[in-house]
Structures are given as structure tokens and as C-alpha cells.
Amino acid sequence: MKKVITLLFTAIIANAIIAQTVDPTITVPQGFKAAKIAEGLGTARHIAISPKGEVYVKLNYGKRSKYQNGILNLLDLNKDGLIDSVNAFGNFSGTGIAIKNGYLYASSDEEIFRYKLDANDKVINANNPEKIITGLISRHEHEAKAITLDNAGNIYVNIGAYSNACQVQDRQKGSPAMKPCPILDSAGGIWQFKADKLNQTYGDGIRYATGLRNVVGLDWNTATNSLFVMQHGRDQLHDLFPDLYDTKQSAELPSECMYELHKGSNCGWPYIYYDHLVNKKIIAPEYGGDGKKSTDDYQSPAIAFPGHLAPNGLLFYTGNQFPEKYKNGAFIAFHGSWNRAPEPQEGYYVVFVPFKNGKPTGQWEVFAKGFAGKDKIENTRQADHRPCGLAQSADGSLFVTDDSKGTVYKISYNK
Amino acid sequence: MKRIVLMSIGFIFFMAVIAQTNTLKESMNRGKKVYDKVCLSCHMADGGGVPKMNPPLIQTSYVLGDKKKIIYIVLHGMNDRIPIEDEYFSNNMASHADLTDQQIADVLTYVRNSFGNKADAVSISEVKAVRNPIKKK
């Protein structure tokens, strides 16, 4: 009898835990389940999961944050599927984190470090990482150094432009643009460095791609063997050029673009922006544009999304857990907009982009939504959660971080 | 006679109070128009800003503090890389020196008395005093 009661209790508790982990506020397609496995971590930016299942999250922590460290190793000591403990280390705030060939890579806004992992994918010397890249520009705007690695020993680093549109006075109405834009020499692009060489700086790396205002979501696509990035498009078309753009156009434009990059790619910032409503590369108003004049110069995006959604995470799905259509397609975590006011804000969801023969089919869909917790967001901080980082676990689940409340979601599929 | 003098003094005083509240209210109304057009896109309709990007204008030491400082910020912009209430913000605020003294006084009076803030008004002469050194050069 006693045994039956114990069993019953265990079953009830187990059920309670499962019920608790499914987050009813997040809507996912039929057959998928979104669980909240951790919360209150702080500014959880990007996330990386090792082959053996160790989860590492990069924090952009501040003075009032709970953890005064930049990296969290999330632990599930009682194996109930929920994070019950964390191991915090790394005294640098930042965004980028990645795992490759037995090393954990992580970035501050100026430097990239790496930590050797042991046989269980645990960091060996948490207080003494190797500094592989140093001296990167960080000037009060677009400082985050998002990173990813290829399979040939290279690391790719976003160095965001410290400017909105390369005006002499940033964001000042009437201030002219600089021609040519000098920022592009040391920022506004993706730089390639060696993944295993110490103390590299600009002279040691190459400017792999240019004309990218700021990239936070980027991933190496192993199916095409090429780098894909998501650009954050420029802001304030209406504020700066009220005669050319009304507030509705300024909310919708320019597009947030996905690019497939190759060495030497030039995506055109600050000279042009992309308009997904007419599928054209439009001359920026600072450089003589009138909102309509277009050009064939510069690389075209692989796919374009509405303006200001802020793509902060990009992940090519290579797992076997999700249905076949997801294989080699791209997930994008949209942080959600701020530069759509006075129009309502938009985004705060995870999108799926199906790929065929290495190219997007063009039919993107919202995959997971509800993070903001409300239907209409007028002021950005009303959003309860803001999706930021993406990672795939060894069993093919999709992890999503939220840098507003420090939540980690695990999305899994069970037909 | 004495009574008439007293009454008129009283009346003048009364009118002065009304005029003052009217000016505050009028200044707030004009200030909201400037705010919505120029400041709202970054600091948001509720003055709450954007986390880690654009700071809030709610109960900050700047908004409630030395008026000269915030007049200076509107005239010259802000690109300081210093924390505001312990938080860093990753964006630049441009100069808004193209606004008139009246508009700057109004918008700052509006900010200092909205979003839960309560502080005294900013006058045109206070804005002039901060702007003038720019004109001299």
C-alpha cells in the first residue's frame, strides 16, 4: 500500500513538473512544445550548447545585475529538465558565445576569449581564458561582437558601425553623410580571424565582408559551407527626412536583411538600403536618394523582412528531431522593434525560413510567438520577454534566450 | 480707499497665480507637441526609453536635477559612455539646437512634469543662458 502511495505521489510530482515546464504563453506549431527551463538569469544574450549537452549563456551584465559575471554554465542537477543551478564565470560583459572543437569562445565588446573544455565539455580553467582577439572598435553604438566559426579554423566577428547612417553628426537632422564612409575601414562589416591564434587584432584578420551596419545574428551554414548574417537596418528615415518618409513608411522601412556572405561581399551600408515592398536597393537619402531611386550595385539580400524587427539570433537547423521541412532551414530570433514609434512596435518572435538548394524559398513563417506577453506593444519595455539567442541541443531541441527577464526556453517536437 | 487698494492687490495676486498655472499648462501642451515630434521615437511615449539603448526620462538624476545640464544635453546631444542610474546605454543622442529657446523650455518643462516626474518649469531665459556661449564662438 505504502509503495502504491509513493508511486502515486511520484507520478503526481512528475506530472506537475511537466505541466510547469510547458509555457502556455508561447504559441508554437502543432506537435511542438515550448518549455521555460530557466528564468531570472539577467541579460541573457547568445547561447551555445556543447555536444554533451552543456549549456553556456553569455550575459551582458550591468552593475545592478544578479550575476556579476559574463558567462553562465546552466546546470540541471536533479535531472528534471529544469535548470536548478548555475556556474558563473568570466568577468566581461558581452553578447557572443560559441563552441567549436573542444573550446568555448566568448566575446566582450572589444575582445574575444576562448576556454578549453574537458572530456565532459566543462570549462577547465574558468579564470584564465586565452585572449585570441583584442582591440576591436566599440564606440557607444552597435558594440556587441557576435561570433561564429566555420569548419576550417576561422572565427567570424561582427564589428558594428558606430553610427546610424554615417552622418558627420550621428542621427542629427541635416548633418551631411561622409563620402566615402570612413567607418567602413574598421567597422560596419564582418572580420575573419584564426580561431586558435593569440592576441590578434585588425592587422591579423581580414575584412571578410563590408557594408553591414550591424549584425547580431549570424551562423555558419554547413549545408552551403558559407556564412549567413542578419543585418539590423538603419533607423529614423522619418525623423531625419520627414519630407521623404511618413511615420508609417519609416516604421516599415528599411528591410531587415539576410545575406549569404563570401569573401569580399559588400552589402551597401550606408549608401543604400533594401526595400522589400518593391524588392529594390534604394539609394539612402543621405547619399542623394529620394526614397525611390534604386541601384544594381551591391549585394542583394537572400531574403528580407519588415523594418526594425531586430534579428538578434540566427541558427541553421541540422537536427533530426523536428519534421523534415525544418532541416537546413533557418530560425531567426527577432528581438522586437523600438524604432517604429509612433506606430505600434513589432517582432518579439522566432521566425522559420525554409531553405531549398541552399536558398530561402521566400515563404517565411512565425514559428514561436507570445514572448512579449501582449498583443500590442507601444513602448518597447512593455514587452515581457525579448528573444535574443538561439542554439540547437544534441538531441535537436531549439533553445531560445530572452535578454529582458533572463528566460531560457526549450522548444521540442513530439509527433 | 484702503479697502480698494487691498482688494486690487489681492486681485492682482490672484491673476498672477492664474497666469502662472496657465503658462505651465500651456508650456506643457506645447512641450508635448515637441516631445512627440522630436524625442518620442527614442525615449518612447511613456518616457520609459528602450532597455540598454535609450535611457528612461523617468525619475533620473538628469531629468530631476540641474536644469543647465539637461538644457545642455538637448542643445549638444549626449554621447558620454557614462552610466545613467547604473546602466549603460548604447546609442547617441543628437544635438537639437535647431529647436527654439521656447521649444526647448517647453519640452523640458513637459518632461520634468510628465511620466511621474515633478519638478519646476524651465524658462526661456534659462535656455538662453546655456545657449549663448555657443553663439559667441
Image: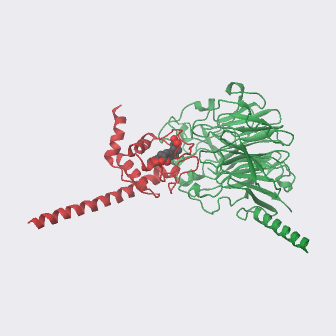
Chain colours: A green, B red
Q: Which residue lies most toward the top here?
A: A203
The percent coordinates of residue B63 (x first, y second) are 44, 49
Q: Is residue A341 rendered to the left or right of residue B119?
A: right
Q: Is residue A137 rendered to the left or right of residue B133?
A: right
From this viewpoint, is residue A63 visible? yes
The percent coordinates of residue A52 (x first, y second) are 85, 46
What count of labels does the image hold?
0
The percent coordinates of residue A377 (x first, y second) are 59, 59
Q: Quarter of the image for the N terminus of chain B: give it.
A: bottom left
Q: Residue at x 60, y 37 (%)?
A: A271
Q: Which residue lies most toward the bottom here?
A: A1
The percent coordinates of residue A280 (x first, y second) are 65, 45
Q: Is residue A136 above or below residue B47?
A: above
Viewer-side residue, A270 vs A107: A107
Viewer-side residue, A68 vs A50: A68
Q: Which residue is drawn at 70% across and 59% down?
A: A369
Q: Quarter of the image for the C terminus of chain B: give it.
A: top left
From this viewpoint, is residue A279 visible? no
Q: Which residue lies most toward the front here?
A: A2
Q: Quadrant of residue A38?
A: bottom right
Viewer-side residue, A29 vs A12: A12
Q: Which residue is drawn at 63% across and 35% down?
A: A188
